[in-house]
Amino acid sequence: QVQLVESGGGLVQAGGSLRLSCAASGGTFSRYTMGWFRQAPGKEREFVAAIRGSDSPYYLDSVKGRFTISRDNAKNVVYLQMNILKPEDTAVYYCNTVVPGTTIPSQDYWGQGTQVTVSS
């Protein structure tokens, strides 16, 4: 399984920005579709964004135009740039491998996540 370590979360005011990072180890990183998910208090974990190669990312509708997913295959890292943050973006954010073309995580293993809190 691919091991995952997320970082970059924090407390930010509405309208602010954060960049999350996820370092992956194990397996051949460049072959995986990588994604971000989030889980808000009292809610189920939901898909946020995914990227297969360097192109063709796809997003949850509510984050389109505000979030950008990218990856660095040389460093085995996937990023999530989050702009114009809203209080409803508050959640623990996780990365994972994704079944290509879907919003479904492809492994049951999850890292510890990183907390993002957006104040109004």
Image (cartoon, rainbow, N blue to C red):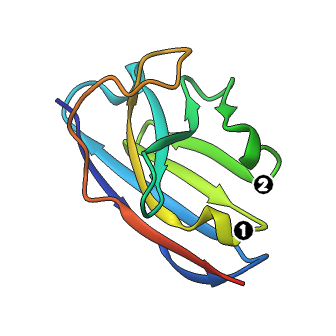
Does 28 appear above or below 25? above
Label 1 near label 2: C-beta < 8 Å?
Answer: yes
Extreme residue in the right direction:
65
Question: Residue 66 placed where, x, y %?
Answer: 78, 54
Q: In which quarter of the image is the N terminus?
A: top left
Q: Report whether residue 22 is seen.
A: yes
Residue drawn 34% across the image and 30% down it: 29
Q: Quadrant of the C terminus?
A: bottom right
Q: Earlier in the sequence, mark 2 or mark 1?
A: 2
Count of marks placed on residues: 2
Extreme residue in the front direction:
42
Residue drawn 22% across the image and 34% down it: 2
Question: Residue 46 placed where, x, y %?
Answer: 50, 41
Residue drawn 61% across the image and 29% down it: 54
Identity, as a three-letter code, of the amino acid under mark 2: Arg
Q: Distance between the residues labelled 2 and 1?
A: 8 Å
Identity, as a three-letter code, of the amino acid under mark 1: Leu
Kindly identify which residue carries mark 2. 66
